[in-house]
Amino acid sequence: MHRSMLAAACVSVLAACSSGGGNSQGNAGTQPIDTAPASPPATAQPFKATQVAEFNEPWAMTFLPDGALLVTEKRGALMLFADGKKLAVSGIPAVAYGGQGGMGDVILHPEFASNGYIYFSYVEAGASGTRGSAVARAKLTRDQNGGSLGDVKVIWRQEPKLSGSGHFSQRLAFGSDGMLWITSGERQEFSPAQNMQMNLGKVLRLKDDGSIPADNPFVSQGGVAAQVWSLGHRNLLGIAFDGQGQLWTHEMGPRGGDELNRIERGANYGWPIVSNGDHYDGRIIPDHPTQPQFNAPKVFWNPVISPAGLIIYNGMEFPDWNGNAFIGGLSSQALIRVEFTGNDAREAQRFDMGARIREVEQGPDGAIWVLEDGRGGALKKLTASR
């Protein structure tokens, strides 16, 4: 465990945006060394990709127990896709749209079948042009027109709200312990990732009602520090648990250095003090090996893949891929497959998708579903080629 709270003095520079920066062919490394070994080249798709719908700037999706799909649209909509139809779900709070901000993730409560609760993240406006991400819980009621949300309650907010429209992160997951996990980006301000008076640049762990678990690593510090599970993160756009209950996240690096991290209790991942990428103005950031007190990524990419969306697969449609991670690539326009060996990981395969992939999800039947980024973003179902 690393609990370092070092301060970093950083001048303002351009930061990576959700459009990503690198090439479609990157370099991946299982260890944070100066020059990463070459990653596998993009290969032909060993699956059939069937387009089933289009959405307006889709960002995230989750399946309901009956196979219907909830899809968020960045401008502030929650859509229900069922029986080939797209219907709107009403009751979404006001969403501050712009830049990387807008409607974010959506997931189900582990006991959704009995309580009907969904959780969603979105960017809300604050005073004097500031913005911050929020997470709300609501009860979903479906009807012939799509449905509505009731009992909407905000259970978490980024603190403080800041100006700018980048690095909200706002990915959500439930663990097997019933706790809610939230990724919170550092809002392109660098130093908040090391500041325990802010819940920015952190992975957070809460109870399902937003209260704080007594066994969180920094609970004795009080305030927003009590929410924190790990710190030193940049812009985390994927979160998933593997079959052993281990949490994994990925995050966009600066100019280079996209990361896949194994998340540990109380650990510090070093941003902005270390990174395997550098600043956009050319200034060097020390690499992870120079300061081993910070947790290093298990895989990093240089040039970047611009990761977005993350699942760890467990299904019958692609049995050879059980236990593998799948990451959507924005600038890389790819679907990246990652294999795990113990606590280590490596990029095993990269599939050229011909479009920016914003989200990845596993369907009830084991198919892999992807959402393309942007206006007219396609929803595609990937099934095994037979």
Image: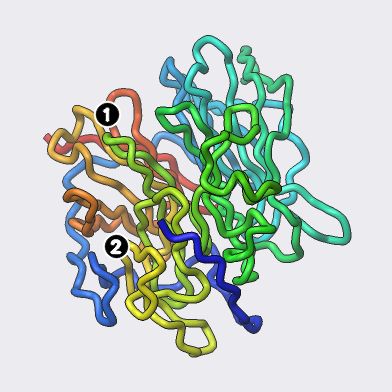
What residue is pinned by disc 2? 299
Quadrant, the N terminus: bottom left
Q: Quadrant of residue 219?
A: top right
Q: Choose the circle earlier in sequence order: 2 or 1.
A: 2
Relative side of 175 to 76, left or right = left
Relative side of 185 to 94, left or right = left
* Res. 302 in view: yes
Instruction: Name the residue at 82% across, 52% down.
Output: 126
Give x and y (percent) for residue 385.
Answer: 15, 38
Relative side of 319 to 186, left or right = left
Q: Which of 270 and 60 is in front in this view?
A: 270
Q: Which mark is residue 366?
A: 1
Give x and y (percent) for residue 107.
Answer: 52, 32
Mark 2 and mark 1: span between their CA atoms? 26 Å
* Res. 233 in view: no
Instruction: Name the residue at 64% across, 84% down.
Output: 11
Tell me the element at label 2.
Answer: strand
Relative side of 177 to 204, left or right = left
Q: Quadrant of residue 7?
A: bottom right
Tell me the element at label 1.
Answer: loop
Identified by mark 1, the residue type is Gly
Identified by mark 2, the residue type is Val
Quadrant, the C terminus: top left
144 w.r.t. 158: above or below = above
Q: Which mark is residue 82?
A: none
Give x and y (percent) for residue 75.
Answer: 67, 46
